[in-house]
Amino acid sequence: MNRLTLRRPDDWHLHLRDGAAMRSVLGFTAARFGRAVVMPNLKPPVTATAQALAYRRRIVEALPAGCGFEPLMTLYLTDNTPPDEVDRALESGAVCGIKYYPAGATTNSDSGVTSLERTFDVLARMEERGLVLQLHGEVTDPEVDVFDREKVFVDRHLARIVDRFPALRVVLEHVTTRAGVDFVRSQGPGVAATVTPQHLLLNRNALLVGGVRPHHYCLPVLKREADRLAVLEAATSGSPKFFLGTDSAPHARSDKESACGCAGVFSAHAGIELYAEAFEAAGALGRLEAFASHHGPDFYGLPRNAGSISLVADAWTAPPSYPFGDSEIVPFRGGEPVRWRLATGTA
Ligand code: DOR
Ligand code: ZN
């Protein structure tokens, strides 16, 4: 049987939610990853360091005894974030970045940024102090087609950010387009991108052909095949600018299977296995470890994890649903085969 052993990977973009919902999904991530960057789009959003520390405590308290998983916290940037919050975040030692959601771009983004200019003083402090900016890179302009929102964000906003703040370290989260990939590639080592499993494995046909598939709906939305291929090529290229960020984003089944379904794909139950499948299909399994376990910590200036995990090429069927608080979630590939399996007992 094919076995693949990797340095323990990290997830550089994760939605854990809170309370019982968080406790339902945390174990999937903690079983696979050494660390995860925990997104701040709770209700209300995590805008201040004190809130991030309290959220972090709730996560750590929900971990099984002896589990070494480390949540890396983020703050939610608003029009009113004070530059001093950057100092508090860094001094806490627990916050690895600040997340920029354009207001209205996605789930719980109503308190996000209404115009780039309003964040300039905070971005200047982040550049000066070395705190990473994590971008949801989509415009919300109603004139812009939903499939073009990433490209237009790159052209209108990201280009301005890197021009004005050349030393700011920026992650274009969940890159989905050739335009996004090309821009990241054109920049220096301070500009990187995370890549989700669904954007490596699926194109927009998986959302729309044969009926609307709400469990494949996420934001940024799945793109056309040429974009998927560009993202896959970037992720498997060995470039240190691209690293693993699942964007696993659980929503109760009833909130997805609805007349106005929520955006988010839950993938934490197979959070490394799905990448192995994508890399294998691209003939690049040998590059999975660098993408999953090296590039992220190197970019964030953190040590690589010490332990390892193993995967075996032994297909299993993902369950059709998992418990999620007092409801349930439908996982990515629910009821369908996943080609790689996490070996138990890996250190
Ligand atoms: O699909 C998404 N779901 N995209 C996001 O940006 C947010 C996320 C969520 O929180 O559910
Ligand atoms: Zn996200």
Image (cartoon, rainbow, N blue to C red):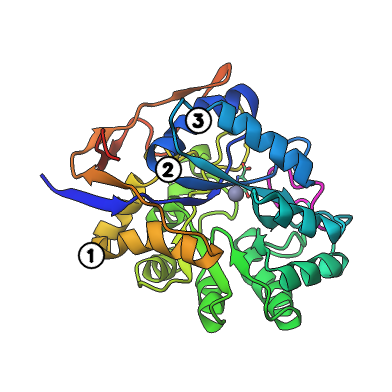
Q: Is residue 225 above or below residue 38?
A: below
The local secondary structure at tag 1 comes to loop
Q: In the displayed structure, does residue 234 sit left or right of residue 145?
A: left
Separation of residues labelled 3 and 1 (CA atoms):
31 Å
Q: In the displayed structure, does residue 149 sit left or right of residue 109?
A: left
Residue designated by label 2: 210
Q: Which residues are magenta?
A: 104-113
**Position in image of residue 8 (x %, y %):** 36, 49
Neighbour class for label 2 at 10 Å: few (<14), some, many (≥20)?
A: few
Quadrant where the C terminus lies? top left
Residue designated by label 3: 25
Residue designated by label 1: 283
**Position in image of residue 304 (x %, y %):** 42, 58
Separation of residues labelled 2 and 3 (CA atoms):
30 Å
Discs 2, 3 touching: Cβ within 8 Å: no
Q: Is residue 144 above or below residue 71?
A: below
**Position in image of residue 108 (x %, y %):** 73, 42
Tell me which secondary structure the magenta stretch mostly adopts.
Answer: loop
